[in-house]
Image: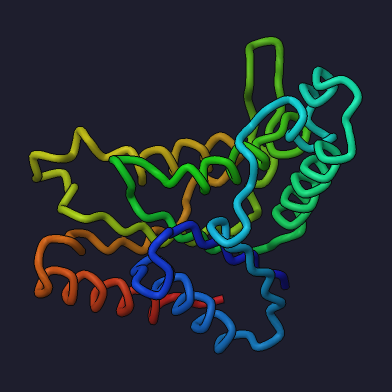
Amino acid sequence: MRLLHIDSSIRGSHSVSRQLTAAIVRKLKTEDPQIEVIYRDLVARPLPHMTFATLPRDHPSSRFSGPLDSTAQLLRNESERVLNEFMTADIVVVGAPMYNWSIPSQLKAWLDIIIVPGKTFTYTEHGPETGLVPEKRFIVAITRGVFYGQETDYISSEHTETYIRTVLSFIGVHNPEIILADGITSGEHNKTEAVKSALNAIQHLTT
């Protein structure tokens, strides 16, 4: 079994989402030591934002780039590696901190590479339909500075979990496992309680 571990926080060792994804991977490895882990740090190794030239070759729109020079070819090769990492993974663990009400741009760049017609979804005469990777298990650690629950005044500004669920549903993953830490910049007590709750939820994960 192969696990793809994705981090996207810019906060390095101070990152709560990185703390949580590391805990998730440790828990799953404890459950099954045979799991192979592939790690990608989207901040240490940022991916280019989407252009025709940076799309993986399997994306139908990549042909609009025309001939690539050597530098552009290296970028496309990296995109193809990213897509292959994703396609061959059984479990995907993603750290998704909320920045400016949504996901980090680094994570958006990664998602833009894996959303590929014919690979992760298909088109029909009615438009895009049918996610092609429903068998993949997604575990997403979401961290948010304040509280965005249904009972709060901020619910309409929540575009992190809602966006991730929309994207994953589009490629066929309708029930991602969300590990949530809310209110981590709302005082040390709230941060401590949020992390404690998230780590407790992680301990209930099984392979």
Residue farthest along the top direction in this orientation: 125
Question: Which percent across, then down, holds residue 55?
Answer: 74, 33
Question: Which percent across, then down, holds residue 185?
Answer: 17, 61
Image point (53%, 43%), residue name: 168
Dividing the image into 4 quarters, which one contains the N terminus?
A: bottom right
Image point (26%, 55%), residue name: 144
Image point (31%, 59%), residue name: 143
Does residue 79 lie above or below 90 as drawn?
Answer: above
Image check: 188 left or right of 162? left
Tag count? 0
Chosen colour scheme: rainbow
Question: Residue 12 sits in which quadrant?
Answer: bottom left
Question: Which percent across, then down, holds residue 199?
Answer: 33, 78
Question: Residue 15 sits in which quadrant?
Answer: bottom left
Image point (33%, 74%), residue name: 201
Say which of 183 and 135 sits in front. 183
Image check: 188 left or right of 201? left
Say which of 207 and 84 sits in front. 84
Image check: 145 left or right of 103? left
Question: Which percent across, then down, holds residue 37?
Answer: 67, 74
Dividing the image into 4 quarters, which one contains the C terminus?
A: bottom right
